[in-house]
Image: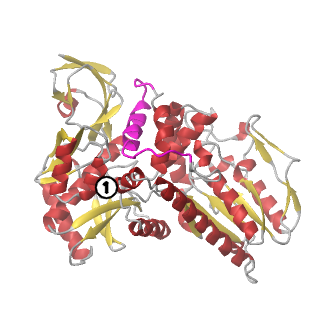
Amino acid sequence: MLKIYCKNTKSFKEFNEGTTLEDMLPEFEFERPYPIVSARVNNVSQGLRFRVYNNRDIEFLDLRDPSARRVYCRSLSFLLCKATGDVFPAASIEIKHPISNGYFCELHCPDGMGAGEEEVARIKARMQEIIAQNMPFHRREVRLEEAIEIFHNYGYEDKVSLLETSGEPYVDYYMLGDTVDYYYGRLVPSAGYLQVWDIVPYHGGILLRVPDRSSPDTLAPFIDQPKTFEVFTEDFAWNRIMNLRNAGDVNHACLEGGASDLIQISEALQEKKLVQIAEEIERRYRDPEHPVRIVLITGPSSSGKTTVTRRLSVQLKACGLRPISFSTDDYFVNRIETPKLPDGSYDFDNFETVDHRLLERDVLALMRGEVVDVPQFNFVTGRREYGRKHLQLSEGKVLLIEGIHALNPQLMPHVPQDCSFKIFISTLTSISLDDHNWVPTSDNRLLRRIIRDYNKGAFSARETINQWPNVRKAEEQWIYPYQENADVMFNSAYLVEFAVLRAHAELILRTIPKNCPEYSEAHRLLKFIHYFTPVSDKEIPATSLLRAFIGTGS
């Protein structure tokens, strides 16, 4: 008999060897406001069909947990792919990227037919039929060579390309009815678990809508993001030109000696975008009716705000302007006045952490041509300090303000909007593992932050991962609602970023003990970055945005 400890009930129960998590669940009584869709076993995410053969700690999860949400969304993706294949046998579907609180998918048909109302309705009806049948998901484990042959026979060359570079002796694949597919994480036991979802036509494709994070019995609200969609579209167009559609293609290019070219091209594309932004700012600066005098720069954690601000300053100088700058962080209220989270820790991401009234007063004074003693926040003493930075917005100068609240309209409500140019820095990874496995847009930022915090001695990997849910929650509240207000979006993600970060992240992530909750996320990230062939950082330029995270930058 097995002795199982359930973290939900903080109690032990005994089971026969080989009992599934799904069969164990009814034996533990605890409050379940939402359906259980997955579990963590010894701090590793598992599907409910997982069989237990040794004593284990188990925590059952609903859709409020990020790992359970990933299990659910993967399963929805497979359901969509199967339904599409059943309704349109000659077609294929690509699940490209998250957008508008859902996932954008492209339908590819030999006759060029797009995803209109009728096509989407037929796919949706088939998805509902599969759910009504409660069709089970089956997992199979086979040797790598057999899996490659299976996917080759089905014409899934994107999966063949990925698996060829995986280096794993055995791999899992899944079946839903007679449909085969590959996913890099677990799925729900059967289609009947998938009750909250929708699909709608969107930008010529399909938007797969998913449950809300905090209230998973309802759909996440639709938020139109045309500018974000445009950034993705631009990057995908370049990827197609280079014939690099997925991680397998990038891995093969690196293995064939193309990593150096990919790094140089990524750097050139980012610099080209910065030149375009600087030239647009310079054009608006000289507009006789509404001259721009302020550039507002924001983005989520580890998106590269500070580095982008510095590099943009160089390009503005090349345009004949003289940039001056400060960070909204310099206007932090004194530590004793900082808002706190429910657990008593300081909420440094809260809008009220910034003395926005003082900041606006100083900006208005600068616009009048006055000399302003701009504070610099001392993070050691927790107080603003004066006397070291005096700024004046005289002729030929433009003011750059960088910070997570820079695009919040409440930051400077009395400053005329037409004198500001707004930049949002995103990290939208344009490469997928394969056609059905997207890359979460926050994973590169989390890896960047783990590496930077560890190398600087600021936080351990365990501490960074522990803080990350609060960081993400703050971004959803204070940053993302204003991203579509930007005049331009700058994508700081690199095509070969995960390949470069892998060598730095692996050793750091392995420092996290297996018996702590943060190991679950470390285990997932280790598995994820293993899909990318490692690339040395020796050819990353000293001025590269990535150097802010991996070190030795100028």
- In this orientation, does residue 98 appear? yes
**The residue positioned farthest toward the front in the image shown:** 257
Q: Quadrant of residue 250?
A: bottom left
Q: Position of residue 209 (x, y in %)?
A: 33, 60
Left or right: 334 with respect to 98? Answer: right
- Residue type indicated by callout 1: Asp
User: Which of the image's four quarters has the N terminus?
Assistant: top left
How was this image coloured? secondary structure
Residue at 29 percent across and 35 percent down: it is 39
Q: Which residue is mark 1?
A: 434
In this orientation, which residue lies closer to the viewer: 132 or 190? 190
Residue at 42 percent across and 29 percent down: it is 517
Total labels drawn: 1
- In this orientation, does residue 190 appear? no
In this orientation, which residue lies closer to the viewer: 441 or 190? 441
Q: Position of residue 433 (x, y in %)?
A: 34, 52
Left or right: 138 with respect to 36? Answer: left
Q: Is residue 134 above or below residue 291?
A: above
Q: Is residue 125 above or below residue 131?
A: below
Left or right: 467 with respect to 224? Answer: right
Q: Disc 1 on helix, strand or loop?
A: loop
| Bounds of the magenta segment | 513-538
Residue at 70 percent across and 48 percent down: it is 329
Q: Position of residue 30 (x, y in %)?
A: 29, 30
In this orientation, which residue lies closer to the viewer: 258 or 415? 258
Residue at 22 percent across and 65 percent down: it is 92
Residue 522 colored magenta? Answer: yes
Residue 543 colored magenta? Answer: no
Q: Position of residue 244 (x, y in %)?
A: 38, 61
Left or right: 263 with respect to 410? Answer: left
Q: Quadrant of residue 531?
A: top left
